Structure formats: structure tokens, C-alpha cells
Image: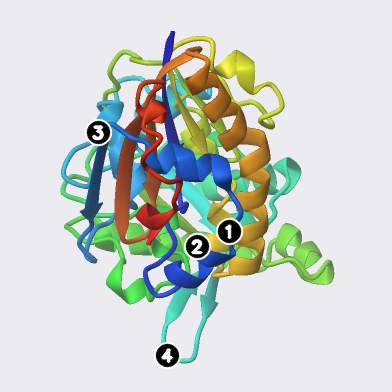
Amino acid sequence: MAHITLVLPFALPLPEFAPDLVRAMNTPALSSLLSRTSHVTRARVAESTHALPHETWLARALGLGAEGRLDVAVAAMRGFGLDPEGGTWYIVSPGHIQIARTHLTMADTRQVPLSDDDSRALFAAAADLCEDIGHALRYGDAHTWFLRADDWTGFETASPDTVVNMDLTDFMPKGQPALAYRRLQNEVQMAWHAHPVNAARETRRLPVVNAFWVWGAGSTAPAPGQPLASVAVPGWLGALGEQRPGSLDRLDGLLATDRTLVVGTLAESAQASDWGVWLQEMAQLETTLFAPLLAAVKAGRVGKLHLVLSSREGLLEATTSAMAQRKFWRSPSLDLLK
């Protein structure tokens, strides 16, 4: 019997929306999974955190960070087949910064489509500037690059998903290397401002790539533990696992052995506060994920199912099993989501 940990970022509605959203949900399998449990814990996260709850949970579970840090760069590099060469590396996320009325915000990278060709062209321009000041830049995928900066110690940064749609003033990188980072950012921004890729993107009415975000410093990576698989997650997170299926169509294969499964299909709608789409995606997960999981638990094919659900503000963990599902006196309910 397999032991499965399912991580669902943004499956917890924000408290102010939760009552209405829960009433609108039609997810009986999820209701059973959350009601007939053997263990439940809930935690709230301080507003000053520089990583989202599911990110810190995964980093801790994978041995890639503690106390809110995400030391994921080197492990992600190896997932992309890159050699970290014993250095200290940061993840570089190219993106779009926009000017609000009183502050700057960063767009969700999921809403900034970036082809491999466009990304590699922008990467080449940035790599030259990085090499000029002694920092190597390596390419992982269109949204995931890596910067070597062995001398950037004490650099406090936040994950890109943490800063999406937030006032960037509260999250700008801090520490002694911050000035060097801002100088490099300015140089790259100037090179990208007149770049043919961005001119073409403007013509196609796509967001220009006008900035990059540096985060996730790491210099070592532990040996892999329980296998990790992921669906619809950012490139850096997918690179930490050994499987990245394009969909949940072959869920039975993922449930055959002990593993952690991260499903990120709710992230874009939750980040955009598009709760109508979020409800539609929850309904789809009921069919493709929750109902098959419940059946596998009841049949004993999954011996223990550990659910990790998160929002920007908190984390819910619940454990169920075939024995727990026999607690018929517990009526199926989504009250834990409130």
C-alpha cells in the first residue's frame, strides 16, 4: 500500500471568501477526504514571510530550507541537468513589473507567456552583462534561469509567487548585495528595453519582459528522499521531482508507490482572485483527483493519504486512511476549508 502526500497550493480560500465559495462547491469526494480523518493540523503564517506556506512546507520536507527560506536553486539546477560546480546559485525569474497608481507590482509569470526562443534571446543579452561583472548565468527553461553569486551573502529575497500583485516595496531584496543586484537589474532592464523581442511582444500585445527576480539561493542539495511528482507547477518546482506529467490522466501510475504529488492548477485563478474559474478548477479536480484518490483509499491501494492545502495566509494538513473513512458518523463536510 502506497503512502501518498498530496500538496494543493491555493486550495484554501482566503477567509473573507471561504463561506461563499464552500457553499458553491460540489466536491463530495473532497468532503469525505477532509471529514473522515485521523489527524488534522492548521497553521497561520506571518505576513512578513518571504515564501508561501506550501513552498516552505515543501522546502522543509525536501531538506531545502528552514525558517521560511527556500534554498532550492542548486537542487533545481540538477533537475535541469546543470552542474552547479560547487558555487552559490540563485534562481532568476524573468518577468513583467507594472506601475500601479502608488507602487510597483510584479505580474504572475503564468500570465506572462514566454516562448523558449524569446527567453533564450533575452537570456543571451542578460548573460553578457552578468559575465562582465563575474557572474555566470545558466538557462533552465523559459521562466527559470540561474545566476552564480558566491559573494552575495546575507541576501534576503522572496519567491516570485509571494510577491505577485503585492507592493514590491515590501519585498525588495535586502542585505549587503542589494546594491549590486539593483545595478545589475538596471543594466539588464536597459538592454531589454530596446530589445527586438520586447518590440515584437508589444506588437503582439503581450506583456514585455522588463525585469528579473532573483531568489532561492542554494549551494548544496541533499540526496532525494520520497519521490516527488508535480502537475501544473513552475519550472523550478517541477525540476525538484522525478516526474512531471502533463495531466492527471494517468493518476493510477502515480499512486502505485510512495510519493509526494504537487498539483498547482488552482494557483493562477487564486492569485488573480478569479474565484469563478477557481470553482471550475475545483470541480475538475473532483473528477480527476479527489474521487480517484478516495476510491484508492477505500480500496486499500493507498494506505495513507496526507493532504496539504494552502492559501497565501495559512496551511491545512489532514491525514486519512481506509480505517478513517469508515467513520460513518462523520458527515462529509468542507468546513475545514473555512
At horizontal 33% and vertical 32% (from top left) the residue drawn is: 319
| Tags 1 and 2 touching, CB below 8 Å | yes
Residue denoted by label 1: 25
- Spatial CA distance of label 1 from label 4 is 36 Å
Look at the numbered disc 1 and give the secondary structure of its residue.
Answer: loop
* Among the two numbered marks 3 and 4 on one chain, the one whose residue lies closer to the N terminus: 3
- Counting every numbered tag in the picture gives 4
At horizontal 40% and vertical 63% (from top left) the residue drawn is: 163
Residue 185 spot, x, y in % from top left = 43, 61
Residue denoted by label 2: 22
Residue denoted by label 3: 60
User: Extreme right residue here?
Assistant: 204
The type of residue carrying mark 4 is Thr
Query: 256 or 89, which is in the foreground?
Result: 256
- Spatial CA distance of label 1 from label 3 is 31 Å
Residue 247 spot, x, y in % from top left = 69, 32
